[in-house]
Amino acid sequence: GVEQDPQRLLRFETLLSVLQEYCDPDLRLLRVLDRTVPPNPNHQVCAGLLHDCGWHHVTCNFDTLIELAAENGAKHAFSTLVRTADFERWCDGQPALAKIHGSFRDAACRGALSTIRATLTTVGRGLDGFRFEYHMRRFLSHALCGCPVLVVGYSGSDDFDLSPFLCRSPSDADIIWISHDEGGQAVFSDLTSAPIEPGLRSLLQKLAKVRS
């Protein structure tokens, strides 16, 4: 058979779980990702959809570049949801930037490293826990099931987090999933055509059954 590259089999969450258990219990190494860099055009577009159009935005990223891009010229007030209390206070219909895996800083720009869910245990607990789970699910049900959904920059490769939530959530709203090939070009196709990666194709086929 074909020998697989072992580097492609190691999940980011698995690596961090091992590091946390044996040498970095507080995952301080993640701070190297908290760099002061300017928002790029992608962050500007996401910010524009939030403060100009009033769209919700759900992200798994820890950085605060969307928040930085949205600091000026906001036409719609929006909430940044990081901590449990943020999701508890969120009101239906209020535009929100939901950081479901936590953030380096919260809505008040305070350090929030403890909110980051980057290991297999903490990521799973974010959607399958108890008190936090209810309020996060309430928001996600509204944002991802009650409205049309545009997915950008998300592989859909997880089997314990956001993808299962989508597959368990029937909706009449459309979902548009933008994927990219290895050269960085956007791929626009239906489920019957290549070149969609097999794992993503399987996920989209499941979504087609519940979002119809």
Image (cartoon, rainbow, N blue to C red):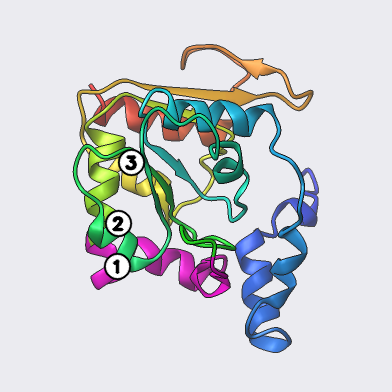
Pointer 2 residue: 136
CA distance separating discs 1 and 3: 18 Å
Are the residues at dot 2 and dot 1 in contact (C-beta closer than 8 Å)?
A: yes
Dot 1 or dot 3: first in sequence order is 1
Q: Nearer the viewer, residue 208 or 174?
A: 174
Q: Quadrant of the C terminus?
A: top left
Numbered badge on residue 132: 1
Looking at the image, which residue is at 26% across and 28% down? 147
Looking at the image, which residue is at 57% across and 50% down? 61
**Which residue range is magenta in the image?**
110-134
Q: Position of residue 53 (x, y in %)?
A: 39, 23
Q: Position of residue 1 (x, y in %)?
A: 76, 44
Residue 169 falls left or right of residue 182: left
Residue flagged by tag 2: what amino acid is it?
Met
Residue flagged by tag 3: what amino acid is it?
Leu
Mark 3 or 2, closer to the camera: 2
Q: Which secondary structure class fits the magenta region best?
A: helix
Residue neighbourhood size for the residue with mark 1, other residues' Cα within 10 Å, grouped as few (<14), some (14–19), many (≥20): some
Numbered badge on residue 166: 3
Looking at the image, which residue is at 29% across and 67% down? 132
